[in-house]
Image (cartoon, helix red, strand yellow):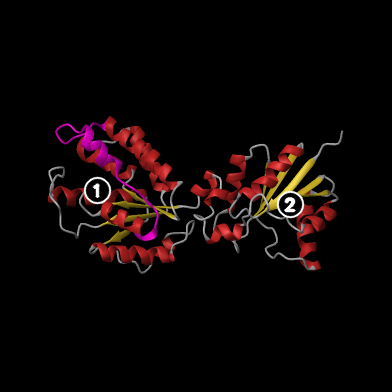
Amino acid sequence: MERKTGLTLGKYAPLHQGHQLVIETALSEMDEVVVLIYDSPETTDIPLAVRSRWIRSLYPAARVIEAWDGPTEVGYTPELMRAHEAYLKRCVGTGSVTHFYSSEPYGEHVSRALGAIDRRVDPTRGRFPVSGTAVRQDPYAHRDFLDPVVYRDLIANVVLLGAPGTGKSTLARRLAQELRTQWMPEYGREYWEKHQVARRLTPEQLVEIAEEHLLQEEALLARSNRYLFTDTNAITTATFARYYHGGVPPRLEALADQATRRYDLVLVCDTDIPYDDTWDRSGEVNRMAFQRQVIDDLRERKVPFFMLRGCLEERVYRVGQLLGRFRKYMNVLDLIEGWPG
């Protein structure tokens, strides 16, 4: 019996249930399935490696080809169709593909060029009325058409750091309200209130804080609208460990290292607001010393960050300016120029 090999392709910008239906249909019918993904920088900022990872994660049985040098123009002129056909022949050869899977009109000419059977899947979009264009315009409105693995990678995780009493919680809550999204409270405060002894926690308890904070944060990413505003992270928890215990447990240090790559934007709230010296805090002098440690640690880790100064309204305005220029997956160093240090 002839071995059946199916090919499907796209930008997957982002991958949605319509795409998944095509891939899953091919996997159910073929002996082998090849998924070709175009780079398409003219369409999406989502890196090709991220989009490839979605498919490899969800469909490990498929063979993924990353088309870094594929044609960028699309259409049905003879010249454009020939360019795409020639490229596909270079990638997969002629005669190696027995079935071409798509939901688009190009299925006809591509199948003919490859000598494959034209297999259209739900061309009217009856089962999943969604498109990549619609998702790019409003991911939150179309989140039900996206796998959680995909949707999580569309959300920008914005973390607010700084010493205690620098306004992080107030600002994170306000930004979430303004942008109709979620914010992640500092889990360490909740934990401290329940478990502190003489206003201290053990190094092992600080590890527990960092791990649980991460779990709650991850859950909120799935419910967020474009942004999640996160109040502190494992870098802060590691700073507490260093400040109060003179060292950081290995597990906590690993979580802090992970935090250097986890967040899309790092905002540091400055100490220029009045200090609210409540019973659970250590005083204005300690706030200043802790703030220096936070900033020095970020610099040592080479994490780009943006300082926020002024009253709440000024800070909200500055973050709005920043987000107006920000795009997830961009190089944040491009935003540094002109930012007041």
Query: In the figure, is residue 319 to the left or right of 10?
Result: left
Quarter of the rendering occupied by the C terminus: bottom left
Query: Quick one: label 2, few (<14), some, or many (20+) residues within 10 Å?
Result: many
Is residue 200 one of those drawn in magenta?
A: yes
Mark 1, residue position? 293
Query: In the figure, is residue 6 to the left or right of 220?
Result: right
* Amino acid at dot 2: Ser
Spot occupied by residue 63 in the image (x, y as percentages of width and height): 69, 42
**Magenta extent:** 178-203
Q: Which of label 1 and label 2 is nearer to you?
A: 2
Is residue 132 one of those drawn in magenta?
A: no
Circle 2 — which element? strand
Spot occupied by residue 1 in the image (x, y as percentages of width and height): 87, 33
Looking at the image, is mark 1 or mark 2 earlier in the sequence?
2
Q: Residue at x 34, y 62 (%)?
A: 319
193 to 11, vertically: above or below = above
Marking on residue 102: 2
194 to 48, vertically: above or below = above
Query: In the figure, is residue 331 to the left or right of 24?
Result: left
* Amino acid at dot 1: Gln
Query: Quick one: label 1, few (<14), some, or many (20+) residues within 10 Å?
Result: some
Q: Residue at x 31, y 54 (%)?
A: 173
Asked if one can make out residue 311 in the rendered structure from this viewpoint, the answer is yes
- In front of the other: 313 or 38: 313
Q: Quadrant of residue 311?
A: bottom left
Asked if one can make out residue 299 in the rendered structure from this viewpoint, the answer is no
Spot occupied by residue 330 in the image (x, y as percentages of width and height): 48, 59
Circle 1 — which element? helix
- In front of the other: 29 or 299: 29
Disc 1 to disc 2, C-alpha distance: 55 Å
Q: Residue at x 85, y 54 (%)?
A: 112
Contact between labelled residues 2 and 1, with CB atoms less than 8 Å apart: no
